[in-house]
């Protein structure tokens, strides 16, 4: 029996009423009437959730689903994890909000983050709590890096996503959301990212071991060439595993080389661990696999155990702000902080990272077996429980198959499995199961993926 078995609804998935059922349709109709047209997720999955436990959710019609996207990595430790819920409820009865006055929950979480930070940040960093979203943590990092170097330019990477505020959106490479907006941040520059399946230098994974290093050498060149058109930057920003970009994992040697390049030039390196961090890849932080130390590390999503909370872990030499230089009314909700402490304690106590690596290895192996049988699954990638499969109409041309992913996602939904999508072309099936997903649930989910794979054809 798995140590996580009691966290979930038993017998999931179980479809009692063909989804979307009548109660779901009624709620979707009301949402259409009352909410902004910006609502996104129900447009792909006609779902109205009534209750969640662990890696399972129940819709308002009584259907039980396996949840393999976990609120886009917000629910790393599952829906309504009892350890987290108990801590949050206890704090809610005592005090919910205290600006940034010291409090036991606040200081406990700060200390826990410092004591578990990657590399040379461990035991020596500082923590800035931000407003609820990861975008705020990114904005904080940018602001501090620019203040530190008294420079403005920033280098980000193709395929990146860092949030929806103005500064964070400027760092993201997706064109459509900002095409009708005024310039968001001048001197934001994009360098190629090592996307091996679609190598930006035309090499790909079969052209020698050094092909994934071309983006790092390109970065060094533009930082060295006085005619590159890029001023000396305040920071370089990257995701060790690009989430929205399509689960594109940066090779470890690339991360090490970027760290060398930025360190030699005294350029702060911002490593965005908002989606890939807090256990998602099988390490507490995704950058740990490369053994590198960020200068600034934004974290959010599952930090509050499902409650909104963000933070920035800072190398102490960069913490040069004066009091009030970066303020916000919601700089850390105490209920979310208490939940965050409980979540980190749960991860250590229950050996969640080892479980994530084992479960992720099983799921990835099943996906690779599917890709061998179905040529439209052009590439399987990721680590831990951050996995992606890129769909193509033809493996030779690698033509993206966005409609195929959408059809695959909907058919999984009808069979009781919730999955999501991502990628440059919307053609990547993205799997982000809660880290407490049991071996039995992983097998059930993989079986559904296998059954659905047989029904989809380019």
Image (cartoon, rainbow, N blue to C red):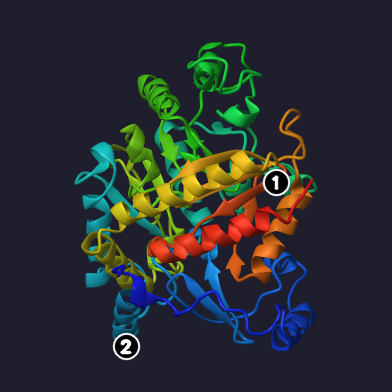
Q: Residues within 10 Å of mark 2 (few under 14, many from 20)?
A: few
Q: Residues within 10 Å of mark 1 (few under 14, many from 20)?
A: many
- Residue 130 location, x and y as percent? 42, 59
Left/right of residue 57 with respect to residue 338 in the rendered view: right
The correct choice, above or below, for 62 with respect to 152 in the image is below
Report which quarter residue 40 is drawn in.
Answer: bottom right
Residue at the spot 64% in from the left edge and 79% down from the top edge: 48
Left/right of residue 332 with respect to residue 134 in the rendered view: left
The correct choice, above or below, for 297 with respect to 61 in the image is above
Q: Which residue is mark 2?
A: 93
Residue at the spot 30% in from the left edge and 72% down from the top edge: 338
Q: Which residue is mark 1?
A: 427
- Residue 398 location, x and y as percent? 73, 32
- Is 439 in front, or is 74? 439
Left/right of residue 407 with respect to residue 86 in the rendered view: right
- Is 210 in front, or is 186? 210
Mark 2 or 1: the one toward you = 1
Mark 2 element type: helix
Q: Mark 2 or mark 1: which comes first in sequence?
A: 2
- Is 367 in front, or is 156? 367
Mark 1 element type: loop
């Amino acid at each position: 029996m798995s140590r996580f078995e009691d966290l979930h609804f038993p017998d999931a998935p179980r479809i009692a009423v063909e989804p979307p059922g009548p109660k779901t349709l009624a709620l979707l109709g009301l949402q259409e009437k009352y909410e902004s047209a910006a609502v996104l997720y129900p447009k792909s999955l006609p779902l109205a959730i009534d209750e969640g436990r662990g890696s399972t959710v129940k819709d308002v019609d009584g259907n039980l689903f396996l949840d393999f996207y976990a609120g886009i990595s917000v629910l790393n430790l599952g829906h309504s994890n009892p350890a987290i819920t108990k801590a949050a409820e206890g704090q809610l009865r005592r005090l919910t909000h205290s600006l940034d006055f010291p409090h036991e929950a606040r200081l406990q979480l700060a200390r826990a983050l410092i004591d578990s930070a990657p590399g040379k940040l461990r035991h020596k960093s500082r923590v800035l709590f931000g407003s609820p979203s990861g975008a705020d943590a990114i904005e904080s990092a940018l602001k501090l890096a620019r203040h530190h170097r008294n420079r403005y330019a920033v280098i980000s990477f193709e395929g990146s996503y860092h949030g929806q505020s103005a500064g964070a959106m400027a760092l993201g490479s997706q064109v459509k959301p900002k095409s009708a907006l005024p310039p968001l941040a001048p001197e934001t520059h994009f360098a190629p990212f090592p996307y091996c399946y679609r190598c930006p230098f035309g090499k790909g994974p079969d052209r020698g071991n050094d092909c994934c290093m071309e983006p790092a050498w390109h970065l060094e060149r533009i930082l060295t060439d006085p005619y590159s058109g890029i001023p000396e930057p305040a920071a370089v920003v990257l995701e060790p595993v690009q989430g929205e970009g399509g689960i594109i994992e940066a090779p470890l040697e690339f991360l090490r080389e970027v760290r060398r390049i930025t360190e030699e030039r005294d350029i702060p390196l911002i490593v965005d661990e908002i989606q890939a961090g807090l256990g998602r890849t099988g390490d507490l932080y995704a950058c740990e696999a490369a053994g590198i130390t960020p200068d600034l590390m934004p974290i959010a999503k599952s930090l509050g155990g499902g409650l909104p909370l963000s933070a920035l872990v800072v190398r102490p030499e960069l913490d040069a702000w004066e009091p009030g230089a970066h303020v916000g009314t919601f700089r850390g909700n105490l209920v979310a902080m208490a939940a965050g402490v409980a979540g980190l304690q749960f991860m250590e106590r229950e050996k969640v990272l080892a479980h994530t690596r084992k479960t992720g290895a099983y799921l990835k192996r099943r996906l690779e077996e599917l890709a061998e049988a179905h040529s439209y699954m052009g590439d399987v990638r990721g680590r831990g429980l951050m996995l992606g499969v890129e769909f193509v109409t033809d493996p030779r041309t690698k033509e993206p198959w966005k409609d195929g992913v959408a059809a695959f996602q909907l058919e999984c939904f009808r069979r009781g499995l919730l999955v999501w999508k991502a990628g440059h072309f919307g053609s990547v099936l993205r799997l982000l199961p809660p880290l407490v997903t049991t071996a039995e649930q992983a097998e059930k989910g993989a079986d559904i993926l296998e059954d659905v794979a047989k029904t989809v054809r380019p």
